[in-house]
Image (spheres, rainbow, N blue to C red):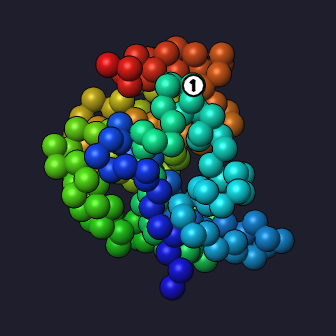
Amino acid sequence: MNIPKPFCFNKSKIKAFVLGADPSNFSDHGKTVYLDTVFGIGSGDHRYFEGILRNLKEIGLGLEDIYVQNLVQEYLPDETSKLKDWEKYADKWVHISKSEFDDIDKSCKTPVLVTAERIMKYLFSETPPVEEIYNGNIEIPFNDNKLSRPLIPFYRHPKYSLNERNSLYRDNLKNRFQH
């Protein structure tokens, strides 16, 4: 089974984890494009990570500051949004992701930038509505989630781009990572 490798330049210098849902895609006319690394980072095909990278730059982070992984690391039979039982796959993988992150950051203080609302709700079922989050709350103020570390919604959908529309949220995140 082809599982994309996580992406990281230097584990000892990361400022955040970036967490995707799974590598599933049907980008080749309905067929899966198999990726060597999560989101195809480093492959020259920027379409999967371009929006996330743009948002990272908006808050002062770059590729050298992050560790990127998918919660579910295997390819699934359908896209995350269309897969009714995605959470069953997540149940199988969440302990692996938690262990992987804990091995890198034993303090459990390095936050996780969560790239989709479905992942966020899976990790913390009481996640507030996205509008409330993007109107100023930075990270969900708890460590009582399935990863036991700070979670920060960092949704990859273009609606949540950290541009002028979401400038308050962007500025709050920029402040958080500059200190």
The residue lying at 72 percent from left, 57 percent from top is 45
Left or right relative to 139: residue 157: right
Q: Secondary structure at mark 1?
A: helix
In the figure, residue 111 lies in which quadrant? top left
The residue lying at 37 percent from left, 49 percent from top is 10
Q: Considering the image in quadrants, where does the C terminus appear?
A: top left
Find the residue positioned furthest to the left: 107
Left or right relative to 6: residue 94: left
Left or right relative to 135: residue 111: left
Is residue 46 or residue 89 the one in the foreground?
Answer: 46
Residue 69, position in %: x, y?
44, 57
For residue 121, say whether it is visible. Answer: no
Decide: is 39 above or below 3. above
The residue lying at 49 percent from left, 25 percent from top is 60
Decide: is 174 above or below 158. above
Find the residue positioned furthest to the bottom: 1
Residue holding disc 1: 58
Left or right relative to 27: residue 119: left
Residue 79, position in %: x, y?
63, 65
Residue 84, position in %: x, y?
55, 67
Residue 115, position in %: x, y?
51, 45
The residue lying at 62 percent from left, 49 percent from top is 49
Decide: is 61 above or below 3. above
Q: Residues within 10 Å of mark 1 (few under 14, many from 20)?
A: some
Is residue 86 or residue 170 the one in the foreground?
Answer: 170
For residue 149, say whether it is visible. Answer: yes
